[in-house]
Amino acid sequence: MATPVNVKKLNEKAILPTYGSDYAAGADLYACMDEAITIAPGETVMIHTGLAMEIPAGYAGLIYPRSGMASKRGLAPANKVGVVDPDYRGEFMVALHNHSNVPQTVEPLERIAQLVITPFITADFVETDELSDTVRGAGGFGSTGFK
C-alpha cells in the first residue's frame, strides 16, 4: 500500500513524480522550465521541478541521479544525494552537474533525477569513552578485502 504524499504545484506546467515500473523505488522528477538549458562541462545549474511536497514525519526525500542520465550523459546531482527533510515546504530543485567533457542540454519536462522516500531514525548521540569491540575494529576503507 502506497503512502500518500501531498504535492503542491508551484507552476502549472509541473509534472507530478512518476514511477517507471510497479517495483521502482525512485519516482522520476521532471524539469519545469520554459526553454532548454545547456550545462557546460564542470558546471552546476539549479533545475526547477515546480513542485513542493509534504514529506511525512519520520521520512526523508532522497534525490538521486537517474542512472541513464548519469552514465550516458554525465549529468547527476552535484551533491550526489539530496536530502529533503520532512519539515521543508519549499520547491524541490536539483543542482544538476555536468561531469562530462561536452555541453549537455536539459529539455523542458525532461526527467532529471529520482526521488526515494524512505523512513529514518533520529539518533540520540551519547558521548562515551569506550565502544564495544568487533572483529573489524577500526579497519577503514578497504579493510574487509576484495572478492
Image: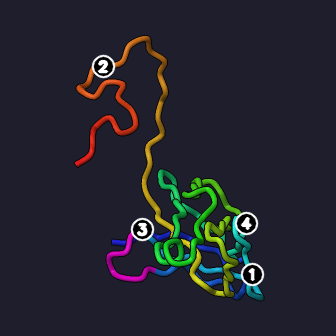
Q: Mark on residue 132?
A: 2
The disc, 2 or 3, on the residue closer to the chain's N-terminal end is 3
Q: Amino acid at mark 3?
A: Thr
The disc, 1 or 2, on the residue closer to the chain's N-terminal end is 1
Residue range (magenta): 19-25
Query: Mark 4 touching mark 2, by CB under 8 A?
Result: no
Q: Taking the image as drawn, is residue 3 in sight?
A: yes
Where does the image place residue 65, in percent across and percent down from the top left? 52, 68
The quarter of the picture where residue 20 lies is bottom left
Q: Amino acid at mark 4?
A: Glu
Q: CA distance from mark 2 to mark 3?
A: 37 Å
Q: Mark on residue 3?
A: 3
Q: Nearer the viewer, residue 65 or 9?
A: 65
Q: Amino acid at mark 2?
A: Ser
Q: Is residue 21 left or right of residue 13?
A: left
Q: Which residue corresponds to mark 1?
A: 37
Q: Which residue corresponds to mark 4?
A: 43
The disc, 4 or 2, on the residue closer to the chain's N-terminal end is 4
Secondary structure under the numbered disc 2 in the rendered image: loop
- The image shows residue 43, relative to residue 138, as above or below, that is below
Q: CA distance from mark 4 to mark 2?
A: 45 Å
The disc, 3 or 4, on the residue closer to the chain's N-terminal end is 3
